[in-house]
Amino acid sequence: MSERYLATLETPALLLDDTRMQNNIDRMRSRMKELGVSFRPHVKTNKSIDVSRRLMDTSEGPITVSTLREADYFAGYGVKDILYAVCIAPNKLAHVTRLLQKGVQLSLILDSMQAAQRLVEFARGIDRPLDVLIEIDSDGHRSGLAPDAPELTEIACFLDASGINVKGVLTHAGGSYDCRSVEAIRAIAEQERLAAVTAATRLRAAGLACPVVSVGSTPTALYAEHLEGVTEVRAGVFVFFDLVMAGLNVCRVEDIAISVLGTVIGHQTAKGWTIIDAGWMAMSRDRGTDGQAVDQGYGVVCDIEGRPLEGFILKGANQEHGIIAHRSDDPSISPNLAVGDQVRILPNHACSTAAQYEEYNVLNDSNEVVAVWPRFNGW
């Protein structure tokens, strides 16, 4: 790698603090050990083999993905044990076949008899076994079957009788992102656990082994009081954290490992604005903190060392312009930044901000760029 320094980077650029990231990983791994469960990290946040190698138990996984392109990418680096944690669409089954032919141990999920029937029809035309988990809705957040739904055992028994391996059940407490207290996160973590365990118990009573009981979100993984009956946890955003997680008290602002480097390009002094070259294309349009106790705009403004500038946020954003202003909207309060000065912006949502970039500029404790790690996007 040719030498890179923050002052010479063309902005906007995505920065990754290696020490913060490793501390976040160590925290999650320690938590999984305390809870006595295996860990299947979700790699949709980082989409990078260099980051994911820090997360995986072995070079072959296990991991969780949200797109089949992720599965392709990681399989290209020798990862075999992959869970595709989005209900399978029929038009992706040919892609599934290609992955299976490469030797990937790919697990699929579904939550309806229609999807099960389409999968069985497809399976008749291939000579490889298919592994499936049934998705459970533990909080009304999105897809999945209620743990007491009659269709649960009907679908599982139909798949089993058709020669498809029903590995178990899976749920995701996405509603934890809407919690307003640590107590509420703990409650939804127990709700998540109980839903998955209840569904697994029903499948076992119907004669299926159901060896896998999979749960996971970063908030519930870190605040669950116990995970009795659960076999594995999935989580992803913890690797970087973000302002939404900080707003939930899941992490501290100083734990956030990624930031966007921007450069001051002008001022609107009468309005108290400092303009930078990082707008919503650099940060994403995600405004996930606007429903929290503290609205962080499009991100928290930090100095070049990554220290928050007290009271300053990215108040507004156009496609390529970001507007730094004080929370109070008092135009007399200025961050005293000159044209050409650089700032770092902490993101609302790590997944969506990182998705705007093709690489991480990895920083050491001296804020020197010591590596450049590629990442990918798309489907």
Image (spheres, helix red, strand yellow):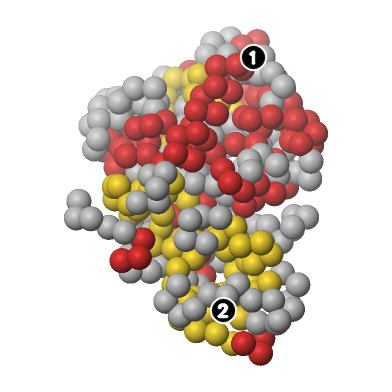
Relative side of 121 to 148, left or right: left
Secondary structure under badge 2? strand
- Residue 239 locus on image (x, y percent): 49, 39
Instruction: Reply above or below: 313 against 267.
Output: above
- Can you say whether 69 is above or below 11 in the image? above
User: Disc 1 vs disc 2: which is toward the camera?
Assistant: 2
Camera sees residue 126: no
Q: Which numbered disc, 1 or 2, marks the residue that appears first in the sequence?
A: 1
Which one is in front, 333 or 153?
333
Q: Is residue 26 above or below residue 9?
A: above
Residue 69 lies, in percent from the top left, at: 34, 46
Residue at the extreme left of the image, as rendered? 2
Inspect the image, locate mark 2, and give the three-letter code of the amino acid beneath it. Thr
User: In the rendering, which numbered label is found on residue 109?
Assistant: none
Which of 114/86 is in front? 86
Question: How far apart, in angstroms, are the residues tagged by discs 1 and 2?
Answer: 53 Å
Which residue lies at the image location 62% right of the left edge and 52% below the top edge?
243
Q: Which residue lies furthest to the bottom in this view?
A: 270
Which mark is drawn over residue 274?
A: 2
Residue that mark 1 sits on: 229
